[in-house]
Image (cartoon, helix red, strand yellow):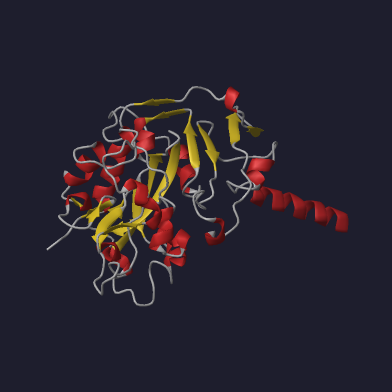
Amino acid sequence: MKKIKRVIYVFLVCILSVNQLSGCAAKETNSNYSTPSELIIKEESSVPTQWPKERLLSPTPEPSIIPYVSADSKNIQIEEYRQEELEEIHIFGSVVSPKSSEEVDNSVVESLKTVPAASMVKVITANAATLAACFWTEEISPEVYSRMENNSFGENCTVPLENLRYIRILHYGFDNEIYIGELVVNKLIADDIIDIFKELFDAKYPIERIVLIDNYKADDDISMEANNTSCFNFRLVEGTNQLSNHAYGLAVDINPLYNPQVKEEKGKIKTLPKEAKEYADRNIDCDYYIKKDDVCYKAFISRGFTWGGEWSKNKDYQHFQKVFP
């Protein structure tokens, strides 16, 4: 009887384990798996590769296997993904304006909702309407708040939680792969942000990383060093007693390592982040610079945002903000 109970226990544990999109799912090759066959997913660590080792918040994990999901009418199997076996990726149409005749594949959308931000997603077959549905916004859930608490949303935070929204998007990374991104923003700009990142996605605009600043203990310097794109963080403007527009969730920093804040102090150029000094010169050739009239600039400006790169002093090339009366 004990042996039978043990077998049943192991069986139940396995069932629970394969519902996760990490760990076991990547290692087991003959287990049930809920992800549709149109996707290949790799859960990425949010630990940035550019951090000095002594500043890492957690050890860099071993690279994970990318599970390739194939399905027939009854069984779904996990196979180890190999690059040479990958089918050509086809993405048709625009997520900004998908064809009205296209139907959303909700199995794809729901699967991606269970995958952590910063995960790579290879789309084998999916229409624009399905990809567009992967851009969504919701009120701050208990799970998201547990990450924000005592980080971006500290005890002294005066912004009501109901004024904020959690956003999930898709974006292209520097490697031209598709990743899942996440932001917390003010509800006043939530729809704008969804539309902006859809536009950037259509343009395949490269953004290295988009995760909550809480992954970096709400340390803006470390987040910028990691080239992390972020929005809400209840904090002051550096060197002042004034609340930043990030404190209200009304400002977004895009690829901050390559688009630093640049100011002159006592005849010397100072950048934030400090590691971005080589990118203070905006005349050098860099694919990740934000420039006036490029696709990123236009996406924000056309929706009423202003750009820190056009400030008369203390240029802030990463920074877009929208101010309300």
Instruction: Tell me: 92 left or right of 70.
Output: left
User: Which of the 4 image quadrants contains residue 90?
Assistant: top left
Q: Position of residue 167 (x, y in %)?
A: 36, 52
Q: Residue at x 41, y 47 (%)?
A: 181
Instruction: Tell me: 304 left or right of 242.
Output: left
Residue nearest the viewer, comparing 176 with 56: 56
| In the image, residue 204 above or below residue 60 | above
Instruction: Tell me: 211 left or right of 264.
Output: right
Question: Does residue 125 appear in the picture of this structure?
Answer: yes
Could you tell me which quadrant the N terminus lies in?
A: bottom right
Q: Position of residue 59 (x, y in %)?
A: 60, 56
User: Which of the 4 image quadrants contains residue 296?
Assistant: top left
| In the image, residue 128 above or below residue 186 | above
Total labels drawn: 0
Residue nearest the viewer, comparing 322 with 7: 322
- Outermost residue on the bottom side: it is 156
Q: Position of residue 152 (x, y in %)?
A: 39, 66
Residue nearest the viewer, comparing 289 with 92: 289
Residue nearest the viewer, comparing 85 with 220: 220
User: Which of the 4 image quadrants contains residue 77?
Assistant: top right
Q: Residue at x 62, y 28 (%)?
A: 82
Q: Position of residue 112 (x, y in %)?
A: 47, 43
- Outermost residue on the left side: it is 325
Could you tell me which quadrant the C terminus lies in?
A: bottom left
Question: Does residue 250 appear in the picture of this structure?
Answer: no
